[in-house]
Amino acid sequence: MRAEQFVERIRAMGITTLAGVPDSTLKPFCDYINREGKTFFHHYVPANEGAAVGMAIGSYLATGKAACVYMQNSGIGNAVNPITSLANGKVYGIPMLMVIGWRGEPGSKDEPQHKFMGDITGQILDVLEIPYAIIGKETAQDELDAMFVKARDRISGNRQFAFVVKRDFFDQVDLGEYCNGYSLVREDAVKEIISMVGVEDVLVSTTGKISREVYEQSDAIKGQHAQDFLTVGGMGHASMIALGIAKEMPHKKVYCLDGDGAVFMHMGSLAFIARQNPGNLIHICLNNEAHESVGGMPTGSAGLEYAEVAKACGYPQSHTVWDLRQLREVLERVRQENVLSFIEVKTAIRSRSDLGRPKEEAVENKNHFMKYHGIPVE
């Protein structure tokens, strides 16, 4: 189905507000509402999925109309609290339509971080008391019509309903790519960082294309990636993982390669890290102002100066760089010091079409990482 046809059905329900976090499964849907839906929807891309549910609640309270919340199924984890403690019928009874991209669908090939959530997506919705319909290319028009009737009934009763969307449901339509005006290629920045990471140092990378680039460039430059921890899931938590390592290994430099969307998702971590003030942590935010790994939609914080936020949160050192020369100079300086540092690197939205993925299982990478750094693995 073309995204605009599906969106028109949502609009016909009287929904005028959409809020969510982009997902690659929902890319045609996200692209359409971001580029074409602004004339008839209020559209928001908040920090995380729980925040999107909060906006939907607020929108309903102010208008009496249900809102639509979209997300990848991994984002249900962020949304559970406001759904159970606020929106559920036993509390405030807030109607809501949910559109959920189904990563890790059983029987399909997908990344390891999606496998478990893919298996239990339906079970979680059952526990949350949210009826759902699974839609894919095999879904007939009359079946979809019946599903929307059920969705209307649930929403009219101040309840929630979810569409769980398979990867083959939406027709792929190229609406053009979002650009941010920066020229530094992120993978070139990753190469520069890896070349400066010492053999005893630790590198933690956030989920998505950043970890894929770290994996390939570490192998190319150092001949191994065992000293790197690839945070292949858990968007927004790489910095806290890096903090945990930095506090337990004060004798090692710990580099955290983060993304702007990931930092935005759990920005409170900046204040906590600054309060802990580990002098051996170098926190690097590769900022392309987009959720590139899941389709390239602009983040809800595009234009935000992350280095200034880190400074305001209490990071002793905060830097912004736009090219490799500046990055090299800043890295040379901070790695010689014992001061918590934040480096914002402005990068273009660009990656190789042949960018690979880790070949090992996630648990293998964990074991290799721990053994490299001298930690016993049972």
Image: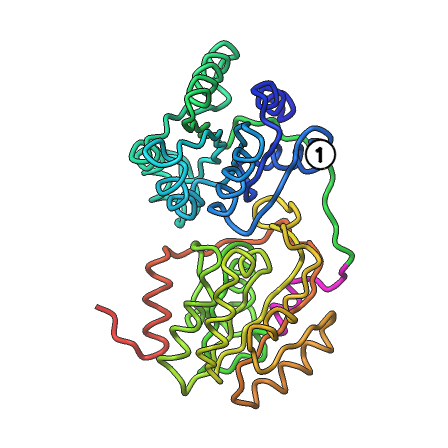
Left or right: 232 with respect to 11?
left
Q: Residue at x 35, y 68 (%)?
A: 368
Q: Position of residue 196 (x, y in %)?
A: 58, 80
* Above/below status of 19 relative to 333: above
Q: Residue at x 69, y 73 (%)?
A: 320
Q: Position of residue 194 (x, y in %)?
A: 56, 74
Report the magenta stretch's main SS: helix
Judge by depth and name the residue closer to the eye, 153 or 340: 153
Mark 1, other Cα within 10 Å: few <14 / some 14–19 / many ≥20: few
Q: Position of residue 71 (x, y in %)?
A: 50, 40
Provide the residue span drawn in magenta: 182-192
Residue at image mark 1: 38
Q: Quadrant of residue 261 in the image?
A: bottom right
The quadrant of the rendering that contains the N terminus is top right
* Above/below status of 5 relative to 196: above
Question: What amino acid is found at the position of numbered circle 1 in the picture?
Answer: Lys
* Above/below status of 352 relative to 64: below
